[in-house]
Amino acid sequence: MSTALTPPAEARPPVRHPEAPAPGELLGAHYAHCFGCGGGQPHGLHLEARAGEGVTVTAGFTVTEDHQGAPGLAHGGVLATALDETLGSLNWLLRVIAVTGRLETDFARPVPVGTVLHLEAEVTAVHGRKIYSTATGRIGGPEGPVAVRADALFIEVKVDHFIDNGRPEEIRAAMADPDQLRRARAFEVNP
């Protein structure tokens, strides 16, 4: 793990927000058109994340033919995306808007098409606007062999980060959503 992903000595343990989803609760897509979790992407991951105890989440997705790199195997970038999406979901438990600052991924074994990848992630520390987290992906379930791991640094941002940098038509559509919670969630974990 790089030193940029190691929390400083003065970092504090993460604190789950009192209004965070309850353990076991499905977090749902933060944005319908998100490649990682949105239902509006026909070739997306359709990753489903659930709140865990403390500041943890579990997630899963099935590797399809659309996710191939080498014949019959998941593309490494798709696996990194699944890890990033799962790690980003953690920020919903803190109730902060944060973006990926750094993602370091290790690939331990190939992941075949048709595999269900089970992911577990947790926030390990918080320091100012920096959120340190880690995740593991296992083949077939929580006890399956480890296929991928990641350590990440997320940076807390204001919604202006998205408004100033996103495509105006998508920003307007998201901001016009009458559902205040869905409107806020649209901006929670994008880079």
Image (cartoon, helix red, strand yellow):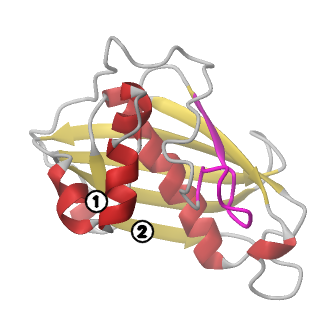
- Which residues are the magenta region? 36-50
Q: Which sits in the foreground, 62 or 41?
A: 41
Looking at this view, is 33 or 129 the one in front? 33
How packed is label 1: few (under 14 Cα within 10 Å), some, or many (20 or more)?
many
Q: What element carries label 1?
A: helix
Label pair 1/2, CB-CB below 8 angstroms = yes
Amino acid under disc 2: Glu
Disc ID at residue 104: 2
Residue 154: x and y in percent read 29, 53
Left or right: 2, with 105 as reference point? left
**Residue at image mark 1:** 5
Task: Give the amino acid at mark 1.
Answer: Leu
Quadrant of the rendered image containing residue 127: top left
Q: Nearer the viewer, residue 164 or 149?
A: 164
Task: Residue at 59%, 51% (x, y): give it.
Answer: 136
Give the spatial CA distance, label 1 vs label 2.
Answer: 8 Å
Determine which of the numbered discs, if any, sits on residue 101 in the image.
Answer: none
Residue 48, x across and y down, in percent: 66, 41
